[in-house]
Amino acid sequence: MNSLQKLRLNTPVRSIKASIADEFLEELLNLDVTNVLDLARFIRRFRHLLPAPGPNRAIQGSLENGVLNWQRSLRAAWHQATPFGREITLLPTIAAHLSSPEDQAHPDAYASVLLRALHIVDRLRVCKRKKCLTPYFIWSPKRRGYCSDICAREAQSEFKRDWWDKYGLDWQRKRRAKKQQGKTKARKSQLKPRGGKRK
């Protein structure tokens, strides 16, 4: 194990489970903040992971506004095309959250979540399906380019419909012509006399 890996294991990410941090990130990013009930449910469920008060971490306005701001900054990172772009976008968010020595000495759970996001920048994805309602997800080999099996199936159906609209009639005509050619050849072969020339 090299020193960089050892350093990563000693960050505050250890203070919360990776699966909980991942779930929090996906829920925060996909949250419809205009839906008051969903927002209240999210705050109630993940209050322990939301930023704690600190010298430079005072939440501007209400907790709801805070959620909207955190969502906005994390979505900006998620939309970057490369892992390096995601890192560059996440770093100012982390730096702003941990700007004072006191904040750095006592990082809260939200700092752990941000560091977790930084560690998995290569897995931050947006669902390829255009009409997806929860497009932000953390990639895994099972998920591939879609947030769920439902989106993968829907995207495949959309692709098939688009293909049929563009090429379907052409393909059908060619197939019928080929079938007709095959029938004509079969008839001709039946009409040919067998066994060579007659005397």
Image (cartoon, grey):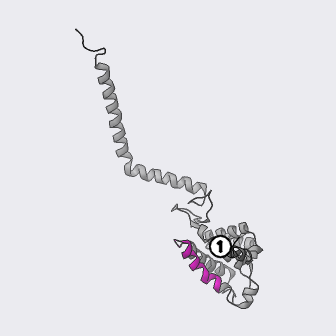
59 is higher (above) or lower (below) than 141 = below
**In terms of image quadrants, where is residue 132?**
bottom right
How far across and how far down the image is residue 98, in percent? 68, 86
What segment carries the magenta color? 79-95
**In this figure, what is the number of numbered marks?**
1
- Tell me where residue 190 appears, x and y as whole percent: 32, 20
Magenta stretch contains residue 91 = yes
Name the quadrant containing residue 50.
bottom right
Q: Residue at x 53, y 73 (%)?
A: 80
* In-image side of 48 versus 94 (left or right): right
Q: What percent of the width, then of the height, locates residue 167? A: 37, 49
Residue appearing at x 57%, y 59% in the figure: 146
- Circle 1 residue: 119
Residue placed furthest toward the top: 199
- How packed is label 1: few (under 14 Cα within 10 Å), some, or many (20 or more)? few
Between 132 and 91, the one lying in front of the other is 91
Q: Is residue 64 above or below residue 32?
A: below
Principal secondary structure, stretch drawn in magenta = helix
Assign a secondary structure to mark 1.
Answer: helix
